[in-house]
C-alpha cells in the first residue's frame, strides 16, 4: 500500500509540473515579435535606420558601383576571375554570391521599409517624416534594382518589358516581376509622396525633401523626361546649402564635402561605410590588377588633358607601375556620398540643353562651373551661345570623368542607347544586349517556378 | 531483489551448514581482486567455491578472505564487466587475482539513457567503446577517435587543423536543414557541442568537445535505434553519444600517469606545378586564345620577376608539429566517499605553423555514501582550451597555398618588404595573431534516495557553462593602414546550459522469472548563447595582452548604447516527461517500452509538444534449454525494436515572426525584420525499425553482431526555398509530404585466432551499408534546398547530397574544346547550368574498419584500418585548378590537357577566357563530372606497438603497471583520388552544407599523420 502511495505521488508530481508555456515560449532576447515591438515612432524610425545602415554598408558602399563598373567599359578586366569575371563578361548566371547577395540585401531593405509603412498608424509626432523616409528608401531600392536587373527605360516603346519584382508590402510570396513601366510608376509615386512628407532638412544619413527631389531628378533623367529632370535638379541646386567643393580631395573625405545631397556620415569606430570602395578602387594599398579598378591609357590621357586638376587629383599612372589607377578613394575612411551636387548639375546641364531656351543657358552655366573647377580655369569653358548638341556632348564627356569609379557609366550607356538608339559602349556591345543586365538569383525560380529569368550572355 | 522466501531459505541453509563446515578441516584463503589493466581494486567481486554456495564479496579495497573446506578444489571469481576466473585452491593464501575485461558478458553494464542495464536486458542497438580504445591515438578531439570502432557510425574527422571537430553520422543522414549530428550526453547532461558557435570564421569550425580530456572518459556508448534513443524523444533521431567519465574506486590512493609525445605532419600533400611550369601553362592558355606576346600575369608580376621566383608556399606554411600530452589521475575511496581526480595538459600542434590546441583540464568525480539509502555524486570538470588559429580553406592560409598563392609570387620584395601584389599567406601568418580561448565548466550533482526497498528517487542538477574569447590582431601592414598602428579585435561568447531532472525507478522482482523495472521522469533544460559585443582598437598588440584597454573599449561601447551581451538566438528549452518499463521474463526474454513527451522552445505554438513511443524486445536464445546441447554456441541473442524518434536540431525560436535590434546607426537604434516566422514549426519525425542478432560462438572465440535497420523520416525541415524578393531568404518550415529513407545492414565480428597464455591474436572489424533516398521533397526544385557552395543538391529519388552537376563527355580532339551531355543525353559543346543532372552521391556504399590485436607476453601489436567503399568525392577546387587558367595554382594531375589537333586528353585546352568554353559564365560554374571521383579509400588509422613491463620488475619500482607504446596514425592511405586527402568534410559552412558536405573538398586542410610515443604508469 505504501509503495502504491509513493509511486502515485511521484507520478502525479512528475506529470503535473511539465507544462510551463512560458518556459517553452521563448523568443530570442534580441528578437521581439514584430507586432508587439513596433509600437511608436521610435521603432518605425529604427526600422528605417536599419535600411540606411544596410544600404550604406552592403549596397552603396562600393558594391553596386563595382558591379556597374564591371559591366561598363572603363575597367580593364582581362585578369578578373570568378564573380568579377562573370559580371565583367556580361554573362551572369543564376549563381554568383556577390551579385545574389546584393540582390537579397536590397529586398531586405524594401521589406523593412514596407513593414514601417504597414505599421505607420502607430506613428504620432513624426509620422509624415517616417512615411516619407520609407517611401524614399523603397524608391531608392527599386531604382537600384531596376537599373541592374532589367533592361532600361525605352527598351520597349511602352516599357512593357519585365522589370523587377515590385514589393509594396511585406509578404512571403512575391510572385512575378512587374513591367518596367509599373516599377517606374511606383518609384515616381513614392518619391512624389516622399517630397511632400519628408522634413526639409535632416542630418546627413537621413532622407529629406532634397534627397527625394534629387533622386526623382535622376529617375526622370533615366526616363528621358528632360523638363522634369531639369526642374527637380534645379530645386536641389537652388538650395545654397550645397556648394561645389573647392578641390577634388574633398569629395571622399571626412567632413570635407559640401556637395552631398544624400549620403552617409562616417562615425569613427561605429559606422564606417565605403569599405567596398576601398577594397575595389583604392590604389595606394593592396592594389592587385586582378581585383581592383584600373583603366586604359586612352582614358587616362583624356582625363589628364587640358591641364586637368581633376585628372591630377583623381588618377595616377605612377603609383602602381604599369597601371592607370584611381586615387579618388585612397583614404582609410570617408563620408559616403550617394547623390551629390555635381550629378545634379550634370543632369541639369544635359536636360537643360535638351529642353532648350533659358534652360540651355542654365545648362551652359552648369557645365562651365564644372569645367572651370576641373581644368583650373575657364580655358575649356563653353561660350554662352554654344549649340545644345555641343553642350550635351561636353556634359557627357565631363560626366564620364566626374563620375568615374562611381558606377555611373553603365547607366549612361543604357540611357544614351535607349535615348538615341546608338550604343556608346567602349567594348562595342549593343546597349540592350541581354548580358548588360544581371541574372536573377536561382532562388526566385526555385521557389516560384513561373518566375521569368533574364536571358544570359550575348553581349561580347 | 532476492525474494524474502528465498532469502530465509538461504539463511536457514547456511545456518544448518555451519556445523558441517566446523567439523571439516578448513583453511582460509585471502587475497585481492584487481583490474588487470590498471591494478585498481575491484569492490563487490564475488569469490566462490566452485560447485558450492559458499562465497564472499570483496571489500572496498578489493580484498577478500574466505574460509573453505579442505575438500574445496576450485575457486571462481566473478565481477561485472570482467571474464570469470577460476583457480585451484593452493597453499598460498595471499592471492592477487587480475581480472580480464569480458568480451561478451551478459552481465556487462551498459549505460543507457537515464540509467544502466545489464547486457542481457538491453533491447536496443548500443555500441560501446571503452576508454583504452578512445585513447589509443591522439586526435584533435575525442570523438574523432570513434572512427572505425562502431558499425554504422561514420566518423569523418573535420581536417588536420588543431581542435577540429568531426562529422559523425549514425546510420545515415536524414535531414537537410536540421542538424544531422548526434546528441552528446556527458554523465547525463546533453552538453553544448555546437560547432558553429563562432560561425565559420577562418574556414574552420571550433569544436567545444575538444575541451574534453579523453583520459577522463570511462566509456562511450553510441545509441543507434529507437529502443536506445527513444527515451531522448525529439532529439533521438540522429543517435545519441553517451559519454561516461571515470569514477572513484575504493582503496588507497592509486595514481595513473599518462604521457604522449609525438610528431605530426600532413597525411597527404597535393602536388602543384612549380613557377616555371605554371608560367608555361599560362602562356599556353594565352596563345590558345589567339594572343601573341607574353601573357599578362596576375599580382603586378613581371615575367622576369616571376621567372626568378619559385616559392613553395606549402613548405613555408607547414612544419612538423609537436604533440605533448600529460595526464595524471588519482582514485581513492573509503566507505563514505570515492573520488576520481584527473588533471591533464595537452598541447597539440598541427602541421601548420602557428596552429595548435592546448588544453588544461581538471576533473573531480566523487561518490558519497551518505547513508545506506542516500547517495550522492558530484562531478565537476573545468577545462581551458587555447586554440591558436590560422585561416584555412577558402579563408586563406594553407587554402591559399592550394589556390591563389602562386609559385611565381615572392614572399618578400627585393627591398625586404612583404610582397602584396597577390596572395601572401606567409605575410598574413606573420602579421596577424589569432586565438580562441574556450573555458568549459561542467558540474553535475546527483542525489539518489532509496525511499523504500528498490524504489529510487533520483534528482539531478547540472550546469554546463562555456565562455570563449576570440582575439585577433593584425599589424598595420596587414590591415593596409597608413597610420602605423595595428588593429586588435576581441569578441566573447558565452553558453549556458542547465538541466534538472528527477526520476523514480522501481525495480520489482515479482519472482525469479519475472522482473520489472519501471522508470518515470521529468526533465527541464535551458540552453542559451550570448555574444559579447565585439570591440576593436588600433593598438600594437592583441587585447589579451591589454585587458585594461579591452575593458575600456567595451565600456565605451556599452556607454554608447550597445549591449554588453546579446543573446544569440532564442534560449533553447525543453520540458519533458518520460517513462520506461523493462520486463525480464526468465532472464532471457527482455521487453521494453518507452515513451517521451517533449515540449520545446524550438516548436511553434501549433505543434508545441511531441510524443515519441517505442517498443522493443530481446531474446537471449542461448539461455534456452534447447540450446544447452549446442556447446559451440555460447551466446546468441535476437533483438528488435520499433519506435518513433524526432530531430529537433534547429535553432530555437524560429517560429516567431520577429524583429531584431542591430548595431547603432548614427547613434540611433536599428531594427530589422529578422525571421519570417512559422507557427506550425515542429520536429522531423522518424519511424525506426531495427532487428539484430548478437552472437558468441566456439567458446566466445567468434563474437559479433548483425543488424538491419529501416528509418523513415518525414516532415523534413527546410530553411530555404523562399523567393529572395520577399526580403527573406530563409524560413524554417516542415515540408509537407517530404520523406527520406535510410536503411542498412551492419556487421561486426571479432575472432580470437590464438588464445594461449603468452600469445593471443584476434582480428575483427565492422562494415555497414546504408541506403539513403530522398523519396519526396514536396515537389520542390533541387536548387530550392540550397547547398550551392558544395555543388550538391537534394533531388527526389536520389540520396541526400547528390552531386548535381553537368556531365562531361570529353575533349574534342579537333579543337580541344569540352564536350558535354545535355539533359537529354545528347552531346553538345555548349555548357549550361540547365544541363545539370544528379550524377553522384557523397554517401559511401560501405563504411567500416578492420583491426588486429596481437599479444605476446608483455608485447602488444595492434592496428586499425578504416575504409569507405563507393560513393563519390567531388573536387570543388579542381574547377579552378584546370582548364581556365586564372590566378590559381594548377594541380599536376590536371596537366593532361589538349595541346594540338588530334590530342586525346582528359582535360580541354587551357584558356584564360571563360568564353572559350561556350556557355560557361565563370570558373565557379565549371562544375562537372570532370572533377568527380570515386571516394573509396583505405587508411591505416592506427598502428600501435606496446610493451607492458613484467610485474616482477615493477614491484621493485613500486609500480603496479607500466606500459610504453608507440602509435602511428594515418600512416598509410590508399585512394584513387589524385588531389590530396580522401577523408573530407568541407568547412562546415552551415547545417545544410554539413549534411551534404562529406566528400566535397574545397581546399580542405588534409588530415594529419602522426607518430606518438607514450608512457602509462599506475602506482
Image: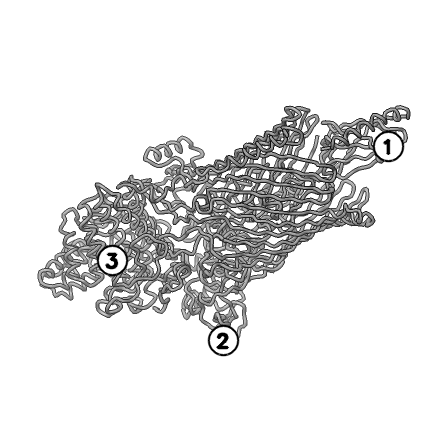
Q: Are marks 2 and 3 on the same chain?
A: no
Q: Relative to the observer, which residue lies in front, A344 or B799?
A: B799
* Residue B254 image-quadrant placement: top right
Q: Position of residue A314 (x, y in %)?
A: 26, 53
Q: Quadrant of the N terminus of chain B?
A: top right
The local crowd at label 1, few if under 14, some if 14 to 19, many if 20 or more residues have their Cα within 10 Å, is some
- In this orientation, which residue lies closer to the viewer: B910 or B182? B182
Q: Which mark is residue B89?
A: 1
Give the spatial CA distance, label 1 vs label 3: 101 Å
The chain holding disc 1 is B
Q: List the residue tagged with mark 2.
A: B814
Badge nearest the viewer, 2 or 3: 3
The quadrant holding residue B974 is bottom right
Mark-to-mark CA distance, 2 and 3: 55 Å
Q: At which x and y percent is residue A147? A: 28, 60
Looking at the figure, which quarter contains the C terminus of chain B?
Answer: top right
B328 displayed left or right of A332:
right
Element carrying mark 3:
helix
Badge 3: few (under 14), some or many (20 or more) residues near its Cα, within 10 Å?
A: many
The reply to whether the C-beta atoms of the residues labelled 2 and 1 are less than 8 Å apart is no
Q: From the image, tell me which residue sits under label 3.
A: A186
Q: Residue at x 37, y 66 (%)?
A: A456
Front-most of residues B168 and B707: B707
Relative image position of residue B308 (x, y in whole percent): 47, 56
Amino acid at each position: 500500500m505504501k509503495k502504491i502511495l509513493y509511486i502515485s505521488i511521484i507520478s502525479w508530481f512528475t506529470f503535473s509540473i511539465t507544462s510551463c508555456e512560458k518556459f517553452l515560449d521563448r523568443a530570442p532576447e534580441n528578437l521581439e515579435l514584430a507586432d508587439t515591438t513596433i509600437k511608436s515612432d521610435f521603432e518605425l524610425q529604427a526600422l528605417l535606420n536599419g535600411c540606411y545602415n544596410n544600404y550604406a554598408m552592403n549596397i552603396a558602399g562600393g558594391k553596386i558601383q563595382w558591379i556597374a563598373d564591371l559591366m561598363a567599359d572603363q575597367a580593364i578586366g582581362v585578369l578578373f576571375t570568378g564573380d568579377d569575371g562573370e559580371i565583367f563578361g556580361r554573362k551572369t548566371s543564376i549563381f554568383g554570391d556577390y551579385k545574389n547577395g546584393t540582390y537579397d540585401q536590397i529586398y531586405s531593405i524594401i521589406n523593412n521599409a514596407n513593414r514601417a509603412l504597414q505599421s505607420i498608424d502607430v506613428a504620432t509626432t513624426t509620422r509624415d517624416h517616417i512615411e516619407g523616409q520609407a517611401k524614399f528608401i523603397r524608391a531608392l531600392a527599386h531604382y537600384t534594382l531596376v537599373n541592374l536587373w532589367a533592361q532600361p527605360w525605352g527598351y520597349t516603346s511602352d516599357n512593357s518589358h519585365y522589370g523587377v519584382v515590385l514589393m509594396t508590402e511585406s509578404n512571403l510570396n512575391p510572385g512575378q516581376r512587374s513591367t518596367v513601366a509599373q516599377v517606374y510608376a511606383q518609384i515616381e509615386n513614392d518619391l512624389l509622396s516622399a517630397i511632400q512628407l519628408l522634413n526639409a532638412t535632416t542630418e546627413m544619413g537621413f532622407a529629406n525633401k532634397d534627397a527625394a527631389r534629387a533622386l526623382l531628378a535622376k529617375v526622370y533623367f533615366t526616363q528621358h523626361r528632360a523638363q522634369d529632370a531639369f526642374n527637380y535638379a534645379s530645386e536641389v541646386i537652388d538650395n545654397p546649402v550645397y556648394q561645389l567643393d573647392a578641390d577634388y580631395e574633398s569629395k571622399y573625405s571626412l567632413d570635407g564635402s559640401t556637395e552631398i545631397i544624400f549620403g552617409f556620415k562616417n562615425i569613427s569606430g561605429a559606422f564606417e561605410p565605403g569599405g567596398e570602395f576601398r577594397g575595389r578602387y583604392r590604389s595606394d594599398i593592396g592594389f592587385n590588377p586582378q581585383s581592383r579598378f584600373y583603366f586604359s591609357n586612352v582614358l587616362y590621357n583624356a582625363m589628364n588633358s587640358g591641364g586637368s586638376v581633376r585628372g591630377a587629383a583623381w588618377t595616377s599612372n605612377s603609383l602602381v607601375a604599369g597601371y592607370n589607377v584611381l586615387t579618388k578613394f585612397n583614404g582609410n575612411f570617408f563620408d559616403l556620398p550617394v547623390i551629390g551636387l555635381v550629378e545634379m548639375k550634370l543632369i541639369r546641364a544635359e536636360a537643360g540643353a535638351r529642353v532648350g531656351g533659358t534652360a540651355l543657358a542654365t545648362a551652359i552655366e552648369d557645365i562651365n562651373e564644372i569645367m572651370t573647377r576641373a581644368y583650373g580655369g575657364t580655358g575649356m569653358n563653353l561660350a554662352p551661345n554654344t549649340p545644345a548638341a555641343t553642350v550635351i556632348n561636353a556634359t557627357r564627356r565631363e560626366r564620364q570623368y566626374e563620375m568615374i569609379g562611381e558606377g555611373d557609366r553603365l547607366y549612361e550607356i543604357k540611357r544614351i542607347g535607349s535615348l538615341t538608339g546608338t550604343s556608346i559602349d567602349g567594348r562595342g556591345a549593343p546597349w540592350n544586349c541581354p548580358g548588360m543586365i544581371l541574372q536573377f538569383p536561382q532562388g526566385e525560380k526555385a521557389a516560384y517556378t513561373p518566375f521569368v529569368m533574364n536571358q544570359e550572355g550575348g553581349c561580347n | 531483489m532476492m525474494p524474502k522466501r528465498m532469502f530465509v531459505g538461504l539463511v536457514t541453509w547456511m545456518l544448518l551448514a555451519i556445523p558441517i563446515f566446523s567439523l571439516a578441516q578448513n583453511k582460509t584463503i585471502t587475497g585481492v581482486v584487481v583490474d588487470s589493466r590498471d591494478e585498481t581494486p575491484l569492490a563487490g567481486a564475488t569469490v566462490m567455491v566452485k560447485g558450492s554456495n559458499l562465497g564472499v564479496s570483496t571489500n572496498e579495497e578489493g580484498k577478500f578472505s574466505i574460509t573453505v573446506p579442505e575438500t574445496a578444489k576450485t575457486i571462481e571469481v566473478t565481477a561485472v564487466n570482467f571474464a570469470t576466473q577460476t583457480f585451484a585452491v593452493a597453499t598460498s593464501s595471499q592471492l592477487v587475482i587480475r581480472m580480464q575485461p569480458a568480451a561478451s558478458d551478459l552481465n556487462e553494464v551498459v549505460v543507457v539513457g537515464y540509467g544502466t542495464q545489464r547486457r542481457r536486458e538491453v533491447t536496443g542497438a548500443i555500441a560501446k567503446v571503452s576508454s583504452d580504445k578512445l585513447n589509443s591515438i591522439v586526435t584533435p578531439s575525442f570523438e574523432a577517435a570513434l572512427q572505425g570502432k562502431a558499425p554504422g557510425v561514420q566518423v569523418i574527422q573535420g581536417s588536420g587543423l588543431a581542435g577540429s571537430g568531426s562529422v559523425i553520422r549514425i546510420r545515415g543522414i536524414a535531414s537537410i536543414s536540421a542538424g544531422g549530428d548526434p546528441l552528446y550526453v556527458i554523465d547525463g547532461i546533453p552538453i553544448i557541442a555546437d560547432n558553429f558557435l563562432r560561425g565559420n570564421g577562418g574556414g574552420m569550425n571550433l569544436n567545444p568537445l575538444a575541451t574534453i580530456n579523453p583520459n577522463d572518459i570511462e566509456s562511450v556508448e553510441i545509441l543507434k535505434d529507437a529502443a536506445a534513443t527513444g527515451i531522448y524523444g525529439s532529439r533521438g533521431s540522429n543517435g545519441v553519444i553517451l559519454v561516461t567519465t571515470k569514477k572513484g574506486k575504493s582503496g588507497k590512493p592509486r595514481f595513473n600517469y599518462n604521457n604522449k609525445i609525438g610528431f605530426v605532419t600532413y597525411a597527404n600533400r597535393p602536388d602543384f606545378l612549380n613557377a616555371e611550369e605554371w608560367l608555361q601553362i599560362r602562356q599556353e592558355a594565352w596563345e590558345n586564345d589567339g594572343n601573341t606576346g607574353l601573357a599578362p600575369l596576375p599580382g603586378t608580376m613581371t615575367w622576369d620577376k616571376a621567372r626568378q621566383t619559385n616559392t613553395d608556399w606549402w613548405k613555408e606554411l607547414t612544419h612538423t608539429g609537436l604533440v605533448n600530452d600529460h595526464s595524471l589521475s588519482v582514485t581513492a575511496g573509503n566507505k563514505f566517499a570515492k573520488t576520481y581526480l584527473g588533471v591533464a595538459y595537452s598541447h597539440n600542434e598541427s602541421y601548420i605553423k602557428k596552429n595548435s590546441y592546448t588544453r588544461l583540464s581538471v576533473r573531480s568525480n566523487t561518490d558519497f555514501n551518505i547513508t545506506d539509502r542516500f547517495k550522492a555524486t558530484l562531478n565537476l570538470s573545468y577545462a581551458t582550451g587555447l586554440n591558436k588559429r590560422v585561416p584555412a580553406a577558402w579563408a586563406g592560409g594553407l587554402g591559399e597555398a592550394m589556390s591563389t598563392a602562386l609559385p611565381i609570387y615572392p614572399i618578400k620584395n627585393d627591398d625586404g618588404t612583404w610582397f602584396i601584389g597577390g596572395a601572401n599567406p606567409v605575410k598574413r601568418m606573420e602579421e596577424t595573431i589569432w586565438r580562441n580561448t574556450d573555458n568549459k565548466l561542467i558540474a553535475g550533482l546527483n542525489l539518489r534516495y532509496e525511499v523504500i526497498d528498490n524504489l529510487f528517487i533520483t534528482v539531478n542538477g547540472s550546469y554546463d557553462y562555456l565562455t570563449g574569447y576570440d582575439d585577433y590582431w593584425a599589424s598595420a601592414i596587414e590591415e593596409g593602414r597608413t597610420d602605423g598602428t595595428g588593429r586588435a579585435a576581441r569578441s566573447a561568447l558565452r553558453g549556458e546550459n542547465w538541466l534538472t531532472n528527477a526520476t523514480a525507478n522501481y525495480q520489482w522482482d515479482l519472482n525469479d522469472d519475472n522482473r520489472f523495472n519501471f522508470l518515470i521522469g521529468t526533465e527541464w533544460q535551458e540552453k542559451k548563447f550570448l555574444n559579447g559585443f565585439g570591440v576593436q582598437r588600433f593598438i600594437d598588440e592583441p587585447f589579451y595582452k591589454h585587458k585594461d584597454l579591452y575593458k575600456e573599449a567595451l565600456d565605451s561601447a556599452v556607454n554608447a548604447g550597445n549591449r554588453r551581451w546579446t543573446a544569440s538566438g532564442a534560449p533553447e528549452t525543453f520540458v519533458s516527461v518520460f517513462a520506461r518499463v523493462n520486463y525480464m521474463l526468465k532472464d532471457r526474454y527482455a521487453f521494453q517500452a518507452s515513451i517521451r513527451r517533449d515540449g520545446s522552445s524550438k516548436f511553434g505554438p501549433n505543434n508545441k509538444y511531441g510524443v515519441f513511443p517505442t517498443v522493443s524486445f530481446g531474446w537471449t536464445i542461448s539461455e534456452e534449454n534447447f540450446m544447452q546441447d549446442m556447446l559451440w554456441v555460447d551466446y546468441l541473442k535476437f533483438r528488435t525494436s520499433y519506435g518513433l524518434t524526432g530531430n529537433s536540431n534547429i535553432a530555437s525560436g524560429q517560429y516567431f515572426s520577429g524583429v531584431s535590434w542591430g548595431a547603432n546607426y548614427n547613434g540611433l537604434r536599428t531594427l530589422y525584420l529578422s525571421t519570417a516566422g512559422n507557427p506550425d514549426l515542429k520536429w522531423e519525425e522518424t519511424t525506426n525499425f531495427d532487428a539484430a542478432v548478437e552472437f558468441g560462438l566456439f567458446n566466445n572465440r567468434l563474437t559479433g553482431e548483425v543488424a538491419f535497420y529501416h528509418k523513415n523520416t518525414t516532415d523534413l525541415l527546410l530553411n530555404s526555398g523562399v523567393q529572395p524578393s520577399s526580403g527573406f531568404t530563409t524560413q524554417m518550415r516542415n515540408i509537407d509530404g517530404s520523406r527520406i529513407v535510410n536503411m542498412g545492414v551492419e556487421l561486426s565480428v571479432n575472432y580470437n585466432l590464438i588464445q594461449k597464455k603468452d600469445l593471443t591474436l584476434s582480428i575483427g572489424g565492422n562494415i555497414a551499408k546504408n541506403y539513403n533516398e530522398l523519396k519526396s521533397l514536396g515537389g520542390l526544385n533541387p536548387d530550392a534546398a540550397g547547398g550551392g557552395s558544395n555543388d550538391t543538391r537534394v533531388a527526389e529519388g536520389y540520396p541526400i547530397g547528390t552531386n548535381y552537376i553537368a556531365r562531361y563527355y570529353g575533349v574534342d580532339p579537333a579543337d580541344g574544346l569540352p564536350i558535354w551531355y545535355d539533359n537529354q543525353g545528347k552531346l553538345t559543346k555548349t555548357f549550361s547550368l540547365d544541363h545539370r543532372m544528379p550524377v553522384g552521391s557523397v554517401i559511401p556504399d560501405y563504411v567500416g574498419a578492420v583491426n588486429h590485436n596481437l599479444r605476446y607476453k608483455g608485447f602488444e601489436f595492434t592496428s586499425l584500418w578504416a575504409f569507405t567503399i563507393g560513393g563519390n568525392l567531388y573536387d570543388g577546387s579542381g574547377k579552378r585548378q584546370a582548364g581556365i587558367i586564372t590566378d590559381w595554382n594548377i594541380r599536376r594531375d590536371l596537366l593532361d590537357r589538349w595541346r594540338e589537333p588530334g590530342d586525346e586528353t582528359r582535360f580541354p585546352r587551357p584558356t584564360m577566357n571563360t568564353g572559350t568554353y561556350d556557355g560557361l559564365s565563370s570558373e565557379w560554374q565549371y562544375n562537372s563530372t570532370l572533377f568527380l571521383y570515386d571516394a573509396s579509400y583505405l587508411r591505416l588509422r592506427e598502428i600501435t606497438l606496446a610493451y607492458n613491463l613484467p610485474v616482477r620488475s615493477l614491484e621493485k619500482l613500486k609500480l603496479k603497471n607500466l606500459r610504453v607504446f608507440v602509435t602511428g596514425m594515418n600512416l598509410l592511405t590508399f585512394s584513387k583520388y589524385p588531389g590530396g586527402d580522401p577523408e573530407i568534410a568541407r568547412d562546415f559552412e552551415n547545417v545544410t552544407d554539413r549534411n551534404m558536405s562529406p566528400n566535397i573538398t574545397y581546399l580542405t586542410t588534409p588530415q594529419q599523420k602522426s607518430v606518438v610515443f607514450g608512457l602509462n604508469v599506475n602506482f
